[in-house]
Amino acid sequence: MLHFPVWKRVLIWGICALAILYAAPNFFYSRVESHNDAVAAIEKAGGTATPEQTAAVGLWPEWLPSNIVNLGLDLRGGAHLLAEVRVEDVYAARMDGLWPEVRDALRGLRDQVGSIRRQTAPAGELRVAISRPEGMQAALEAARRLAQPVVSFTGMGQNDIEISSQGDVLVIRLTEAEKTAMDSRTVQQSLEIIRRRVDEVGTREPTIQRQGEDRILIQVPGIGSAAELKSLIGTTAKLTFHPVLGRTADAQSSASGDLVLPAANEQGIFYVLDRSPVVTGEELVDAQPSFDQNNRPAVSFRFNPSGARAFGDYTAQNIGKPFAIVLDNEVISAPVIQAHIAGGSGIITGNFSVEESTELAVLLRAGALPAEMTFLEERTIGPELGQDSIDAGRTAAIVGMIAVVAFMIASYGWFGVLANIALAINMLAIIALLSVVGATLTLPGIAGIVLTIGVAVDANVLIYERIREELRQGKQPGRAIELGFEKALSAIVDANVTTFLVALIMFLVGAGPVRGFAVTLTIGIFTSVFTAVYVTRILIATWFAWRRPRTIVV
């Protein structure tokens, strides 16, 4: 009769304790975070924070969980930008990079094509005039040898350039497949660069996503203004290639003058580098995921002529030695030079997966924004609006909880009190899960929590009505409670599964506010079922074992 194994009691109470533990920082860190922001602002300005300003940090011990719910743009305030990437700039840059190769290829045919001269052409097109039109066929064949396969799943089997002639003019154009692939790479590269810039300032949960073919939506909670965000995005990454002098676990063990930088993907490992770079990211033209001769994932790269010369000389003298690729003062890769890399093109091999090689290629290209961005929308949202929304949401939650608590007590007496205790644990569990998974709480998310308060006790109502029915049939109190929980379980599961499916569809199909609502609603479904079925039952079982009543009133 209402027997709970010891392991089940420990598990249930352990989950409740964890919920309280992980939710608790949210009630302390609202003050700590504001104090930390103030202290950071003072120190950034060159001042020193007072003891009173730093005292709030001690409100919550550092050794305890300290994740807090992230507030979205509509609650915390921040900056909103909608940027359009000018992909035409990338087309022009690609033709500028191709011109030296075409020029060198045609110089070897000077006796057939005569002198060569580049003409003005639109973005994505290269026009080269030759003085001997009779040599056009030889020029076409030389140019066609420069074509490469399109690096894209949609462009498989196609070349990146198409070559034709117009009289004495050799015309080289980017194919549509290559333009599509370049557009995708350009926007992806811009997304990665913007994400790295925004993350460096420690802002919480920025929204950086692609919209349409060539637009990027950027929303950053907690930043001062749209102008500040634009300035932040416009900064240039520092990409360099350095000789590797050694590896160490001690950041202070190198000789003076050497550069010691941490490995991005190896915890506790530092690379000792020559302070003078071999080449810099300004000389890197392109980097793409590819495969080596053994069909293993790798990364191919290409430098401009000056970078190609410097890199070729270095690799010729350092075969078998590693060199470091440094991005924003972190060593993202340190491949070993396998052979002399002439011509400015090479390949980075290693124990990469396809995903890792793609990510490394993006990082290599992330030295600077690949194309200029035009900002179509700029909005700065003040925190006052967010605080009003938080206050309104808090008021709605409190009023809703009071109404639910009063209804449950009026309808079910002492059993209603136990259901309300479970409801409180349910609310803490929702906050704890939002904190742990790093979800961003928006105004629709608050609406989802308020809705959860209203429906959280539905399962308790079903259980209590079942218990009443069993009591009317003459069952003993303990047996009636046990049967009430058992018989109501299937109805509870069915009701919540349908709600979960709707929330899942909202999350997958919806965007922005709709997804925020779906997240809190989904979390609320799981926590509500747990607290109503298990927490309420263990509370009733504990009370029943303590009081052992002969009769009960539900």
Image (cartoon, rainbow, N blue to C red):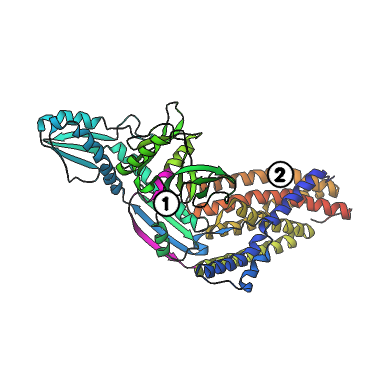
Within 10 Å of disc 2 (Cα), the crowding (few <14, some 14-19, many 20+) is some
Q: Residue at x 42, y 51 (%)?
A: 238
Relative to residue 108, is residue 501 depicted above or below? below
Along the line of sight, the residue nearer the viewer: 14 or 419: 14
Residue 301 location (% of width, % of height): 38, 38
- Please, what is the three-letter code of the amino acid marked with disc 2? Leu
Which residue in the protein does label 2 denote? 489
Q: Looking at the rendering, in which quadrant would you find the C terminus? A: bottom right
One can see residue 166 in this view: yes
Residue 20 in the figure: left or right of residue 378: right
- Reply yes or no: does residue 380 show up in magenta: yes
Q: Closest to the observer: 525 or 391? A: 391
Please tell me which residue lies in front, 439 or 60: 60
Q: Left or right of 199: which side holds 149? A: left
Most extreme residue toward the top is 294
How far apart are the alpha carbons under marks 2 and 1?
A: 59 Å
Residue 218, labelled with which disc? none
Classed neighbour count for the residue bearing mark 1: other residues with Cα under 10 Å, few (<14), some (14–19), many (≥20): some
Height in image: 199 above or below 357? Answer: below
The magenta stretch spans residue 277: no
Question: On the image, numbered disc 1 is attached to which residue?
Answer: 238
Q: Position of residue 295 (x, y in %)?
A: 44, 27
Residue at 72% in and 55% down: 422
SS class, disc 1: loop
Q: Position of residue 544 (x, y in %)?
A: 85, 52
Q: Nearer the viewer, mark 2 or mark 1?
A: 1
The amino acid pointed to by label 1 is Lys
Kindly indicate the quadrant of the structure image that contains residue 66: bottom right
**Magenta residues, start to end:** 362-382
